[in-house]
C-alpha cells in the first residue's frame, strides 16, 4: 500500500497512475487526513503531492506532524518537498525566476555515493519537468542536496537514514525523462515494496462495487460509443445484466456519420441501445451562448433532463452510470483535498446539477484512458472501439469558439471529415491520440476569386499522449498539412485561413474550450 497525500496538484492522479504502471497499489487521501486514518490503511510508503498553494502562506496546507514519525519511507514532490524542508528546519523562498516546463537536472557526487538507491540508473544529466514559484534555498541540517538545476539549487534532497527524499520536479509527468525510474527506485529500493497490483483485480473489485451500489435498483447509462462509456456498459452487463438500460443521445453535436457508426459498433459489441433524438433541444438551449464553461454546464443539464425523463418510463431506476475518468475529475477540480485549481468543467462531473435525483455509478473514475482500453481488452471489446480517438462529451460544442449555430456546426463537420480523411492516409495515424479542427471565431482578410474575403480561421490540433494528462503536438508531414489546408479553404464555405496548433499540454489543454 502506497498512500499519496493530495495537496491539490493537477498531477496527483498521475502519481497514482505511474505507481500502478509499476504494479504497486496506491490510494489517495487528502493532505489533512488524520494519523489514525492513514495508519488504518497500513501504508508502507507515503508520497506528498505538489499543489497550487505556497508553503510561505500563513494558512498553507500542512499534514499531521506525527506522520513524520511513522518510520516509513516518504517522498515529497514539489510542494511536498518544500513542506518537508520547512518541517525539518530548512529555508523556502519565493523565487525571482519561476520554472515552468522542461529543464536540465544535474546530479551531484552525493547522489552517486549516498543517494544511489534512489538515483539508480539515472544519468548525471537528464530532463525534468518543473512547475513552481517557490524553491528550497537552504535544505534542513539533516538533509543532503542530491541534484540541482540552473536556477534551483535544491532540485532533489534526502535523508537516507530516515528514508525521506524530496524532489522539486515532477517525476510523474512524462516530460521527466527518467521520472518513472525514479519512482520505481523509491518504491522498490527505498520502500522495498512488492509489485502485485493488476487491472484484473481492479475489474473484480469494480464489478462487486457495481452490484453493491446498485442493489435492487435499475441503472441507466448515457452511452456515446467511445471506449469509456462502452467499457462501462460492458461492466454493467457483467455485474447487473438485468438491471441496466443504456441510451444513446444524439445532441446534434456529433461528427458526420457518427450516429450510424456508433450504433453499429455497439450492436457488434452485444449492447442494445435506445436512440434518443434531441438535436433541437440542445441547439435551442445553446442559442446565444458563447462562454465555453456555460456551454458545458448547459449540455450537462440537458443530458440529465433527458435521462431523468427517460428514467421515469422505467420503474425502479435509481442510478445513472457514467464513464467518468480520472482526468475528467482532476480538470474539474473535484479533488479529494478540495484545494485543486479549477481548469475546466467536464459535462459529466462539474456540469451535473446539484439537485439531480439519480445516484451516480462511475466504475472508471480512478482509471486513465490507456487503463480503460486495457480493461476493455480484458472484457473482449473489439478493436474498432478500443482504438477510437477520445471525443468530448459536449461534442463539437467545445470546438466551436463563440456562438453555436446550425450553420457553424455544418461547417465544422465538413472540416472534421476532411481532417479525418487525410490523416487516415498517414502510416503513423495510430500514434495520434486526438486530431480535430476548431472554429476559432476569428476572421481574417483573404483573397478568393480575385476578390477580398473576410472569413473565419480554422485551427487544427493533433496531439500524442499516453493518458490525456500531458500531451505533445504531432509533427504532421507538410504534404498532409498542405492537403488539409487546401481542402478546407476550398471545400468549407466561410473559411479562408488554416493554422496549426503547436502547443503542448501543459501549458495548454487538449481541447480549446
Image (cartoon, helix red, strand yellow):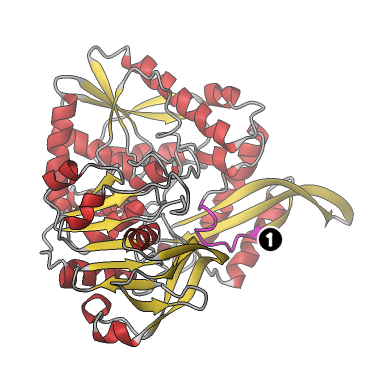
Residue 241 visible, this angle? no
Looking at the figure, which quarter contains the N terminus? bottom left
Q: Height in image: 54 above or below 325?
A: below
Residue 93 visible, this angle? yes
Q: Quadrant of residue 308?
A: top left
Looking at the figure, which quarter contains the C terminus? top right
Q: Quadrant of residue 37?
A: top left
Q: Which residues are magenta?
A: 499-510
Identify which residue is drawn at 25% across, 35% down.
Answer: 271
Residue 169: x %, y % from top left: 41, 67
Residue 305: x %, y % from top left: 43, 19
* Labels in figure, total: 1
**Lateral position of residue 186 relative to residue 327, left or right:** left
Q: Secondary structure at mark 1?
A: helix
Magenta stretch secondary structure, dominant: loop
Residue 223: x %, y % from top left: 35, 34
Identify which residue is drawn at 40% across, 57% down.
Answer: 79
Neighbour tally class for label 1: few under 14, some 14-19, many 20 plus, Cα within 10 Å: some
| Nearer-the-camera pick, 325 or 40 | 40
Asked if the magenta segment contains residue 502, the reply would be: yes
| Nearer-the-camera pick, 219 or 12 | 12
Asked if the magenta segment contains residue 367, the reply would be: no
Identify which residue is drawn at 16% across, 60% down.
Answer: 72
Q: Which residue lies under the disc numbered 1?
A: 486
Amino acid at each position: 500500500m502506497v498512500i499519496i497525500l493530495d495537496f491539490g496538484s493537477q498531477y496527483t492522479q498521475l502519481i497514482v497512475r505511474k505507481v500502478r504502471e509499476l504494479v504497486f497499489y496506491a490510494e489517495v487521501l487528502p493532505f489533512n487526513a488524520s494519523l489514525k486514518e492513514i495508519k488504518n490503511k497500513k501504508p508502507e510508503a507515503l508520497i506528498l503531492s505538489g499543489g497550487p498553494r505556497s508553503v510561505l502562506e500563513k494558512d498553507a496546507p500542512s499534514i499531521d506532524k506525527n506522520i513524520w514519525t511513522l518510520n516509513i519511507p516518504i517522498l515529497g514532490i514539489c510542494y511536498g518537498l518544500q513542506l518537508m524542508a520547512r518541517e525539518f528546519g530548512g529555508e523556502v523562498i519565493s523565487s525571482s525566476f519561476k520554472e515552468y516546463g522542461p529543464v536540465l537536472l544535474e546530479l551531484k557526487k552525493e547522489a552517486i555515493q549516498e543517494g544511489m538507491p534512489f538515483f539508480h540508473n539515472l544519468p548525471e544529466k537528464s530532463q525534468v519537468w518543473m512547475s513552481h514559484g517557490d524553491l528550497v534555498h537552504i535544505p534542513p541540517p539533516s538533509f543532503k542536496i542530491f541534484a540541482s538545476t540552473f536556477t534551483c539549487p535544491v532540485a532533489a534532497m534526502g535523508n537516507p537514514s530516515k528514508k525521506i527524499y524530496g524532489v522539486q520536479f515532477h517525476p510523474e509527468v512524462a516530460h521527466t525523462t527518467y521520472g518513472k525510474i525514479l519512482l520505481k527506485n523509491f518504491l522498490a529500493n527505498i520502500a522495498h515494496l512488492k509489485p502485485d497490483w493488476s487491472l484484473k483485480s481492479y475489474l473484480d473489485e469494480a464489478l462487486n462495487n457495481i452490484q453493491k451500489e446498485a442493489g435492487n435498483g435499475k441503472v441507466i447509462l448515457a452511452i456515446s460509443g467511445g471506449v469509456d462509456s462502452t467499457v462501462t456498459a460492458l461492466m454493467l452487463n457483467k455485474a447487473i445484466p438485468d438491471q441496466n438500460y443504456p441510451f444513446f443521445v444524439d445532441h446534434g453535436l456529433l461528427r458526420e456519420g457518427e450516429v450510424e457508426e456508433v450504433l453499429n459498433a455497439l450492436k457488434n459489441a452485444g449492447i442494445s441501445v435506445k436512440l434518443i433524438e434531441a438535436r433541437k433541444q440542445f441547439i435551442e438551449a445553446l442559442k446565444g451562448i458563447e462562454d465555453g464553461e456555460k456551454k458545458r454546464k448547459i449540455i450537462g443539464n440537458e443530458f440529465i433532463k433527458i435521462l431523468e425523463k427517460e428514467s421515469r418510463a422505467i420503474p425502479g431506476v435509481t442510478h445513472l452510470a457514467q464513464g467518468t475518468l480520472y482526468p475528467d475529475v482532476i480538470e474539474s477540480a473535484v479533488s479529494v483535498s478540495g484545494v485543486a485549481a479549477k481548469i475546466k468543467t467536464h459535462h459529466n462531473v462539474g456540469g451535473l446539477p446539484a439537485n439531480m435525483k439519480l445516484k451516480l455509478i462511475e466504475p472508471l473514475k480512478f482509471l486513465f484512458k490507456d487503463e480503460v482500453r486495457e480493461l476493455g481488452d480484458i472484457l473482449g471489446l473489439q478493436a474498432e472501439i478500443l482504438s477510437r480517438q477520445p471525443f468530448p462529451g459536449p461534442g463539437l460544442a467545445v470546438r466551436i469558439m463563440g456562438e453555436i449555430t446550425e450553420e457553424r456546426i455544418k461547417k465544422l463537420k465538413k472540416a472534421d471529415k476532411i481532417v479525418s480523411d487525410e490523416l487516415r492516409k498517414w502510416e503513423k495515424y495510430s500514434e495520434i491520440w486526438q486530431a480535430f479542427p476548431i472554429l476559432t471565431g476569428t476572421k481574417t482578410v483573404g483573397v478568393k476569386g480575385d476578390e477580398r474575403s473576410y472569413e473565419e480561421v480554422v485551427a487544427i490540433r493533433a496531439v500524442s499522449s499516453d493518458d490525456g494528462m500531458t500531451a505533445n503536438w504531432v509533427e504532421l508531414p507538410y504534404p498532409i498539412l498542405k492537403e488539409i489546408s487546401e481542402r478546407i479553404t476550398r471545400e468549407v464555405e466561410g473559411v479562408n485561413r488554416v493554422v496549426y496548433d503547436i502547443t503542448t499540454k501543459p501549458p495548454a489543454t487538449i481541447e480549446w474550450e
